[in-house]
Amino acid sequence: MYRAGEMRNYDVIVVGGGHAGCEAAAVAARMGARVALVSFSRETIGAMSCNPAIGGLGKGHLVREVDAFDGLIARAADAAAIHYRMLNMSKGAAVRGPRVQADRRLFARAIQAALAAQPGLDIVVGDADAIVTDPAGTVAGLKLADGSLLSAPALVLAAGTFLGGRLYRGEWSAQGGRTGERAATALGRQLRDLALPVARLKTGTPPRLDGRTIDWARLERQESDRDPWTMAPDTPRRTNPQLFCAITRTNATTHDIVRGGLDQSPLFSGAIGATGPRYCPSIEDKIHRFADRDGHQIFLEPEGLGDALVYPNGISTSLPDDIQLAMVRSIAGLEAVDIAVPGYAVEYDHVDPRCLDRRLGVRDVPGLFCAGQIVGTTGYEEAAALGLAAGANAAASALDRAPVLFDRATSYLGVMIDDLVLQGVSEPYRMLTARAEYRLRLRADNAWTRLGATAAAAGCLGEARRRALDSHRADCARANAVLDGDIGYDATRGRPRDGQRRSLGDRLALADTPFRDAAGDIPALAALAPEAIDEVESDRRYAPYLARQDAELRALAANERIAIPADFDFAAIPGLSNEMIERLTAARPETLGMTARIAGITPAALSAVLVRLKRIAA
Amino acid sequence: MGYRDTIFALSSGRLPAAIAVVRLSGPHARIALKLLINKEIPDRSPRLVAIKGGDGALLDRALAIRFDGPGTATGEDIVELHLHGGRAVVDAVLATLGAIAGLRPAEAGEFTRRAFDHGRLDLIEAEGLGDLLAAETEAQRRQAIGQAGGGVSHQVATWQDAALNIAARIEAAIDFSDEDDVGDADVAAIHAACAALGGEIGLWLARPPAERLRDGIAVAIAGPPNAGKSTLLNAIVQREAAITSPIAGTTRDVVDVAVAIAGVPYRFLDTAGLRGDTDDAVEAIGIARARAAAAAADLVIWLGDDDAPEHAAVIRVAAQSDRRDGPDWDARVAHADIALSAVTGENMQRLLDLIGERARALLPRDGEVALNRRQRDALAAVADSLDEAVRTRDLLIVAEHLRAALGAFDRLTGRARTEDMLDALFGRFCIGK
Ligand SMILES: Cc1cc2nc3c(=O)[nH]c(=O)nc-3n(C[C@H](O)[C@H](O)[C@H](O)COP(=O)(O)OP(=O)(O)OC[C@H]3O[C@@H](n4cnc5c(N)ncnc54)[C@H](O)[C@@H]3O)c2cc1C
Ligand SMILES: Nc1nc2c(ncn2[C@@H]2O[C@H](COP(=O)(O)OP(=O)(O)OP(=O)(O)O)[C@@H](O)[C@H]2O)c(=O)[nH]1
Ligand SMILES: [Mg+2]
């Protein structure tokens, strides 16, 4: 423990104990950095501000990618999971999205336990007041509100929605980052002082219901998946009892009540000017924009095992309390429901991510990294993934190691970072599989294979995970060897054989059933790890399509190798339109490939950049 | 990195100007120069040359310079033509270059890209790029306000929106399958939408290309030696464009003559007589060229027996009707579309009418918008992708083909696809929890 006024030295300081901050601190410590994790309070570390669910489409992929770096979120999700659901089970393996419903308290406890067990990581309870820089403008440390100082050459800012946070509900509004928690106002002001581009975004959350007042018997139930998969592939088994969710709908009465209250909603009265996410609209928005719909589905999700709170997924709102209550009571099964905590909207500062480089480092403030909601994303998984990337790079920078970079062609993390730092955001950014042009390669089930080598090389893996990864690789190699062999198995069953020699893998691919179903007939298959069979099966099924993308990827890689210096002056290129100069200057692409991806940059503009590059080099 | 095709472009500033520089770069640059000026000139010494079009007509007297690679601006063989900068001259030279196999107009920035890939960028004049950028912006502006190619851009934009909407349906089903507003993907309906769009694009692709209006309809006159092909050509174009003689094997090279008849532009191609048994090496080359010309032509006038070449459009002619030569004359007339004499003029008008009739089907109709080569290539790629999309029920693979289709549209219109698709998606479905 420390005393106020004392000065302590670290390699990396992380501000924020949310999903971004926890992953950042943990990965930096795994890499051998001495880390301080600063948070308002110890209890809220690992808190879920909103929906107690982890994973989903695109998001589940991110969770598995963080897990491939030995991160916290997948294992914590398993420790807290009270309901598992594999989304898109009927579709191709590349877009299956693992999602769990998590017990809020168990989740935070798992995160806190993992952090406590991590050597080299101190938790510092305090209010981060100001980032300290040296005269050259490089990060030197952090000043806390009580006056004490922490020193470090690298700092990850992961303050979530707390910077300049303001909560809204009906005509009520107050400063705050989350209900019942204060905002980080001084820090928000400092970012503006550091001349970082800051803008406002908003998001919202539904009221929490008292589950004891819900008429569950009337409602359709959704049970947890029986198939025993887990969020982290090496979690031995599911531990918690599994709860069910229930489904209900809004109706015409609900819509009338909402419409009647629109003038008291801060979203419509003009109190909130910032943009919210289109994929996470408030019920006010849904009813206003899609007036023709007669009802909207609501999932009633239990918040925890010993917890009566229920999260009504689908009715985020900032209407006044009385209207919220009338609204929920108009819904089937909720006629007598009590609201435990009302819904609200929050408007907050975020940093325009185009001021970041691919390491999530602030270009103009060496040593400063940003991650999580503060860079314009929304969601725990997005925050955790960015935290991992920023933490790894902060540690790499402090320890003088090579940066840890992510590629669009090999990870959702690469897609997200590339999108953020090049295009910026116009609404809170959420991961979608549609954003990944190479999504056939980026499956949730092959995250370890895709990223394991990078993670190991960067020193992000603990000993146990290194062994697990090695054995998974060996399993896959064995599975491939068996499938490449020519074992007599007639996949076409009954249909005449064409006499051609085919490998077992090719034969199985001809049949439309999963490879593992053939294990009963083929002892060599039965001896393999089922996850390895699934993974190499998908590799094989998608192989022809992946081969087609190879040329595209080679061209991409060629452009990616052409670097653009940090001080490159886009405005000095003759002939570029002002709009192009503005976009290029805001995003400061680091390679020609990145330049090409910025919206609105034409091939001719790209050549102009090339010419200028060559001129400078000459 | 080796490129297989040769690119060309007007590389000096805007027209009209005192001098217009047309630059070619790539493996065929030297051959193309030889075709244009009919002789070789030495490496790196400027020569005043006569540039001729495909029909032999003089296009311009200009300065030509040949730079052999790799020590050139792009690292490839380069040819520069310094033309008198009138629009008509430049257009004619560019059109002639475009008709040469292996050559195509350069995309914006392509010279620079080649220079870069060959490590030669320092030699490119960067100032020219400003103009290029200005020209590009100007073209986009005109496109946007629908002056140039407005009809096509509008149509392409409509198709692109249709494809974006299909993609949005698929992506919604993939990324938001747990939303009740989205529901399960109706693969049959998505297939139907792909097929409908692909079919519509296919109809446009089946239409005559825009280039025929500019370059003319290619009509090859082919048949055995001495059939009277050159005589017929001269009669059609009403001048002594080709040498005629009673010696079999008079015509060796392809004679290419551009004329307009009844307002329709044509290129008539007189060819060497076809026979299998020549020992003359030069004639053999001529015969090979004749076959190639006939195969590439829009229309073939065949002066032989019933062994006309395989071609979609053939007019069979029994020639020299004034002579009615040989025992098989009646047989020839029987399987010909028309019997005529280029010497007496008998049935010549009927032949021209017949050609005109066929030609109308090959040209864009009045008021009908035609696609140029670049548009056709991109749209053909779209149509192929849509066609493949219909052949699988795996939604993910359907999405992959749609992605390829949208990529082809992007190359044509320069729009960004993911954001547009998401706009379509969120506009259509009420999504979100
Ligand atoms: C009201 C609301 C609704 C949301 N709705 C959704 C939703 O529907 N779907 C969805 O996917 N996501 C939603 N989110 C987003 C999701 O909660 C966040 O994206 C995610 O938690 C961001 O993680 P983070 O680590 O960036 O920040 P947070 O989880 O917000 O963590 C920030 C941390 O920083 C600490 N901190 C901040 N300032 C200081 C300081 N000065 N000194 C010390 N500590 C500090 C805080 O104590 C906290 O621990 C919502 C968030 C909110 C607030
Ligand atoms: N009487 C008559 N003579 C013709 C007619 N057409 C061609 N001839 C003669 O036939 C001979 C051959 O004619 P060309 O036009 O040179 O024949 P070609 O098919 O071009 O022959 P090659 O170039 O050698 O393949 C010449 O002497 C012509 O004058 C015709 O319609 N009537
Ligand atoms: Mg002849």
Image (cartoon, helix red, strand yellow):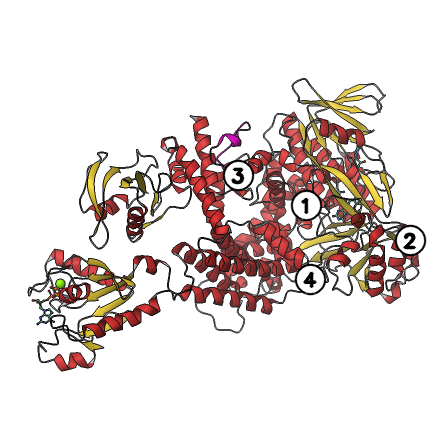
Q: Are marks 2 and 3 in contact (CB under 8 Å)?
A: no
Local secondary structure at mark 1: loop
Mark 1 residue type: Tyr
The answer as to whether the residues below labels 2 and 3 share one chain is yes
Q: Which residue bears the numbered disc 4?
A: B182
Residue designated by label 3: A595
> What is the CA distance from the residue labelled 3 to the residue labelled 4?
35 Å
The kind of residue tagged 2 is Asp
Q: CA distance from mark 4 to mark 2?
A: 31 Å
User: Measured along the vertical axis of the image, is residue A143 above or below residue A355?
Assistant: above
Q: Could you say which disc has been placed on residue A322 in the image? A: 2
> Disc 4 residue type?
Val
Query: If the picture is divided into quarters, which one holds ligand 1?
Result: top right
The quadrant of the picture occupied by the N terminus of chain A is top right
Give the quarter of the image for residue B66. top left
Q: Which-is-in-front pick, marks 2 and 1?
A: 2
| Circles 1, 3 touching at the beta carbon (< 8 Å) | no
Q: Residue at x 71, y 31 (%)?
A: A156
Pointers 2 and 1 within a single chain: yes
| Chain bearing mark 2 | A
